[in-house]
């Protein structure tokens, strides 16, 4: 397994010194926003992690290697490449074997983070059960990964293009704790709340770190979702964004968009329909997640 992992010097030094490391995905760079905005965002998020006392490890597939941390030059090249595969668990071995560029989804970032012994992962929002998933079976691999991979995911809830109720039911069935950070309700990505109440609320990063440590000390396999709402000043109006999402979903259905193409299509269309406001919200929530996730990582590292 070690032959496939390629650690950046910054991450190598951090692990040798016993510093906390925070994993970051690369799909948001390759499929989430255009160049050069994507690279600028990635660098800013990495710097937030450093400023909070942890070390960032942006994960991507390059030349048959799983890169655990990217150099500045690699990040620039990756963000400016047109032909980057979106890599979930199903695709990982093939993309590594044929040595093409691959961007890691939530599921694959979790897999690679666990291989690299990294327990904390910061992203925008997790995937879930798509609307109509009870008949189409269109369910993100993120949920299965959360059920079996020991990595905590800090996010602004599940993407609001999904069926949030079915997503929560799926996570409950799989025994995945969803912990609200300073909230009693599931955040819905662009908005701070939804109609779905959470079982657990934590008002400090120390409580979350204690919970994660206890979970894994007890041998309870799988990850956890740390649901961290978008800051109030950056949140979108619920009625407005719900109407936009509904229109984007109808258009995707008419255009026969499905599977792993759904999320990039929908997020892109929502960006167009909101004149870029949704992208601004996306960037804001990722940065906020980086602050909170890094603080949890520092606290958890101090308990080891």
Image (cartoon, rainbow, N blue to C red):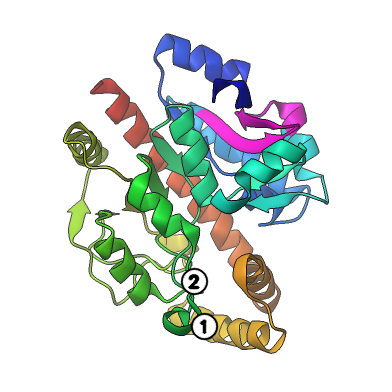
Percent x, y for residue 213? 22, 33
For this view, does 227 lie left or right of residue 215?
A: right
Range covered by the magenta-colored residues: 56-74
Q: How many marks?
A: 2
Say which residue appears at 62% left-offset and 82% top-offset.
Answer: 248
Percent x, y for residue 90? 58, 52
Give the residue pinned by disc 2: 236
Residue 41 visible? The answer is: no
Give the residue pinned by disc 1: 240
Say which residue appears at 68% left-offset and 69% top-offset.
Answer: 268
Q: In the figure, 281 relative to 114: above or below?
A: below
For this view, does 185 lie left or right of residue 230?
A: left
57 in the magenta segment: yes
Q: What secondary structure is found at the residue carrying circle 2?
A: loop
Q: In the figure, 47 relative to 224: above or below?
A: above
Asked if the residues shown at circle 2 and circle 1 are in contact, with their CB atoms under 8 angstroms apart, the answer is yes
Seen from the viewer's position, the closer of residues 139 and 267 is 139
Q: What secondary structure is found at the residue carrying circle 1?
A: helix
Give the quarter of the image for residue 262: bottom right
Percent x, y for residue 304? 26, 21
Say which residue appears at 69% left-offset and 56% top-offset.
Answer: 31
Give the quarter of the image for residue 216: top left
Say which residue appears at 66% left-offset and 82% top-offset.
Answer: 252
For this view, does 103 lie left or right of residue 55?
A: right
């Amino acid at each position: 397994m070690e032959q496939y992992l390629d650690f950046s010097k910054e991450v190598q030094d951090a692990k040798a010194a016993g510093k906390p490391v925070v994993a970051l995905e690369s799909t948001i760079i390759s499929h989430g926003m255009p160049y050069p905005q994507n690279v600028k965002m990635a660098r800013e998020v990495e710097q937030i992690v450093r400023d909070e006392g942890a070390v960032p490890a942006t994960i991507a597939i390059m030349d048959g290697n799983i890169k655990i941390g990217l150099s500045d030059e690699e990040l620039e090249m990756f963000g400016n490449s047109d032909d980057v595969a979106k890599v979930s668990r199903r695709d990982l071995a093939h993309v590594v074997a044929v040595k093409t560029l691959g961007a890691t989804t939530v599921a694959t970032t979790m897999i690679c983070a666990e291989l690299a012994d990294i327990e904390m992962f910061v992203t925008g929002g997790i995937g879930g059960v798509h609307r109509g998933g009870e008949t189409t079976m269109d369910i993100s691999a993120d949920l299965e990964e959360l059920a079996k991979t020991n990595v905590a995911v800090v996010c602004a809830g599940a993407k609001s293009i999904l069926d949030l109720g079915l997503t929560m039911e799926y996570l409950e069935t799989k025994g995945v704790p969803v912990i609200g950070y300073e909230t009693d309700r599931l955040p819905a990505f662009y908005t701070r709340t939804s109609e779905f109440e959470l079982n657990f609320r934590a008002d400090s990063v120390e409580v979350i770190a204690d919970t994660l440590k206890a979970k894994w000390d007890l041998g309870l396999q799988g990850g956890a979702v740390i649901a961290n709402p978008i800051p109030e000043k950056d949140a979108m109006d619920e009625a407005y964004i719900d109407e936009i999402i509904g229109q984007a979903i109808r258009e995707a259905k008419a255009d026969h968009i499905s599977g792993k193409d759904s999320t990039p299509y929908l997020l892109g269309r929502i960006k167009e329909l909101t004149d870029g406001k949704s992208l601004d919200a996306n960037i804001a929530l990722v940065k906020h997640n980086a602050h909170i996730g890094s603080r949890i990582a520092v606290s958890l590292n101090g308990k080891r």
